[in-house]
Image (cartoon, grey):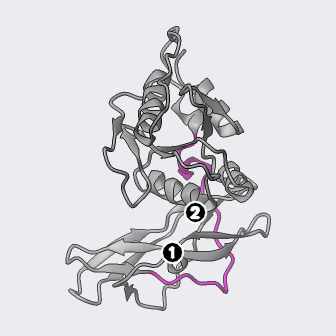
Amino acid sequence: MAESVLVRCPVCRREHTYTAPVYPCSCTAPVVLPLLRSAPPVRRDHRTWEGSWVSVRCAQCGRDDEWPQPELACECGALLCLPVDRTQPPPTAARSAQPPRPSALRSSAPPTRRPAFHPVTIRTAQDARTAAAQYLRWLGFADVRVKERRPSYGVDLRGPGVVAHVDPSTAPTALRDVETLWLNGLNESAVSVCFSLAGYARDARTRADELGVPLFVLDLTGTPQPVNDPADDLIRATPR
């Protein structure tokens, strides 16, 4: 089970109850980061990409993976970094506590027939985002909104229960883009979906498979094509 610890902010001395998040190992075992109870939290004034990850070994399969460093935001504005005990194997957690997967979206209501998808021809980066948003709406995600300007945190589309990244560049989408999108989805308890015009780097594709991130490739007609199993699961899980 995920452990809860009492965390005292070193700035304002407020106390918080923190529950370690659950992450899915590639072997399908849920992993909880083992918190180092004997060490106090450290205030983080500047976040770096390298400092935002911690290596933890799965207790079931023994695989070492990089997971987000546990953090807690205090009401006083301080961002607290919680140390991880790397000398202890991480505890496993109940499978029901895993982050949502596309298959979890399957509706209990009787399926309805979905109309044909009408793509948007892509001539600009904004066209690519519009095409991806239209596809998500077609899949059944209501009120998907398109960002007019690309945000620094990598989420171009957002709707209830879904966040998406759209890469309109001519280079394959990188590993960092996939992991950043997944983190955003994890923080919002939403499904993360990625769209790319140029495909995906090999390590990005492998990581997406491990994390359950659906990957789609957009052609210039604006028609997305699934390129991994989570994408196929997402299509099957939404009403037709």
Using the image, determine if residue 167 lies above or below residue 6: above
Q: Nearer the viewer, residue 213 or 106?
A: 213
Q: Residues within 10 Å of mark 2 (few under 14, many from 20)?
A: some
Does the segment drawn in magenta span residue 102?
no
**In the displayed structure, would residue 89 be above or below residue 134?**
below
Helix, strand or loop: magenta stretch: loop
Q: Is residue 25 above or below residue 127?
A: below
* The residue stretch that appears in magenta: 82-101
Sort mark 1 into few (<14), some (14-19) or many (20+) by Cα contacts within 10 Å. few
Whole-percent x, y for residue 66 in the image: 63, 70
Residue lying at 23% horizontally and 81% vertically, measured from the top left: 14
Task: Give the percent coordinates (x, y) of residue 188.
Answer: 40, 51
Position of 228 with respect to 96 (left or right) is right
Q: Quadrant of the C terminus?
A: top right
Q: Which residue is mark 2?
A: 176
Mark number, residue 49: 1
Q: Mark 2 and 1 residues: CB-CB less than 8 Å, in contact?
A: yes
Amino acid type indicated by mark 1:
Trp
Quick one: quadrant of the N terminus? bottom right
The residues bearing labels 2 and 1 have C-alpha atoms spaced at a distance of 9 Å
**Where is 165 relative to 26, above or below?**
above
Q: Residue at x 42, y 81 (%)?
A: 81
Q: Residue 231, position in %: x, y?
A: 63, 35
- Residue 156 position, x and y percent, is 41, 46
Sequence-first disc among 2 and 1: 1
The residue lying toward the viewer, choosing from 33 and 4, is 33
The answer to which of 39 and 76 lies nearer the viewer is 76
Q: Quadrant of residue 137?
A: top left
Report the amino acid beneath label 2. Answer: Arg
